[in-house]
Amino acid sequence: MTGAQNAMEELLSKSNETQIKDIGAGDRSAAIPQNPPKKAVKPTGERTPVPASKTAHSKQNKRTNESIGPVRRRKKKKMSLFAAIIAELKDLVKNVKIPRWALTAVLSVIGIAVALTVAIVLITKIDFDKEIIPDISCGNITAEVSADAAQIPVFTAPAENNRHTVTVDIFEGEQIVCSTLPTTVSDIVEKMNVEVSEEYVLRGTLEAPVSEDMSINYDKITYGTVTETASVPFETKTFDVQNVARGKSIVTKKGINGVSTATYKITYVNGVESERVLESQVITKQPVTQVIHKGVGGTITIGGKTYSYSHYIDCKTTVYTGGGTTASGLPATEKVIAVDPRVIPLGTQVYVEDPYCYVGIRTAADTGGAIKGNFIDIYFDESNPNLWGYGVRRARVYILD
């Protein structure tokens, strides 16, 4: 190729320096040739000798210095590249004496090579003017496009090229837009040299075929630990008892919720929680069980006779005497007791079980200023020996039905 260029430059140089020389009367070598004069027809067998001056005159221009006039120079004529090449080839043919058929063969080979090159360019439609991405940095991902391997410009490919526009989208990284012929996701990733850290995962499969406007997504997978506390409900236990009025329930011990501490392993996809796995759970505060007493009543036998009761009350007891009329209007006898009406309503039949003396069945008929809460005052006649020295004792009082 270098020899051809040198020959072409030499040819152009010679062409530009070409001038028309003055032609003198005595300058036969530079004379402009004219068409030779017509020969005179002579009879057969007769030959007329041609003078030497006549012969020389027929081989040169008939114009003399006087007819030509002053010397004139022609303007330089520029030659095209193709014309220069053709001229150089002609000179080679003249000098080297290359046969015409060989020259034709050489020109044919050159023409075929040029045609094939043009055809390849048109078929592949490689646009060398478009900018190819040499290197794209996307956070933790580096995508390199090799000019030999991919030739992927950042432009949407024309539909007639049978190419697809594909976007490689990496979370927290730049989007890479490329054009490609029908292929697979694996081929795109390989040719673009997409390298990701372990925390990135391809969404979908590598074997998936590429389609128009397809997005190849890389999701960022991260993990974290979360500790949470939760309330542990208390349990409730109910007991049937006789010291609570039948059908009534009271809370004797209030329940308290406990505290549970749980540790979870969280999986995040692109910063959004996608999965939660329990790793450990510990009761950091035990709950307190609530206790309920429910009154169910019962029966008691007194003097061979059975009585049913709603409930019983363990009370502090004292005794009093003096007769008179009770607060309810009944006479003060050994058939009545004084009570706190808020605990034992007036008129209630009770059985007083005193471990020290017999009291029996009484009616809550009287009250007293010192009688408050679970406290009763038993009436004894002055003749009753239990009156003296009774003091303050404790007795169980059954509330009879």
Image: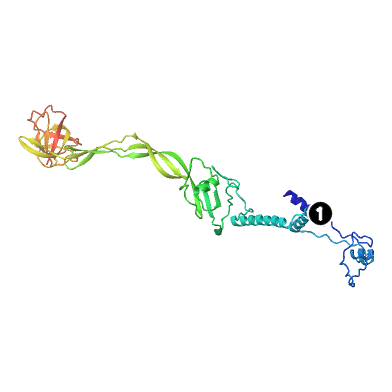
Residue 260 is situated, as x and y percent measured from the top left of the image, at 35, 37
Residue beneath disc 1: 13
Residue 176 is situated, as x and y percent measured from the top left of the image, at 55, 49
Q: In the picture provided, is 3 more to the left or to the right than 350?
A: right
| Residue appearing at x 42%, y 45% in the figure | 274
The answer to whether any part of residue 325 appears in the image is: no
Residue 207 is situated, as x and y percent measured from the top left of the image, at 47, 48
The answer to whether any part of residue 18 appears in the image is: yes
Which type of secondary structure does the marked residue at label 1 adopt?
helix
Residue 147 is situated, as x and y percent measured from the top left of the image, at 60, 48
Check the picture and name the quadrant holding the C terminus: top left
Write down the quadrant of residue 163 in the picture.
bottom right
| Residue appearing at x 50%, y 49% in the figure | 185
User: Compared with residue 119, is residue 141 higher up or lower down, i.e. above or below?
Assistant: above
Q: Nearer the viewer, residue 104 or 44?
A: 44
Q: Nearer the viewer, residue 164 or 395?
A: 164
Q: Amino acid at mark 1?
A: Ser
Write down the quadrant of residue 249 in the picture.
top left
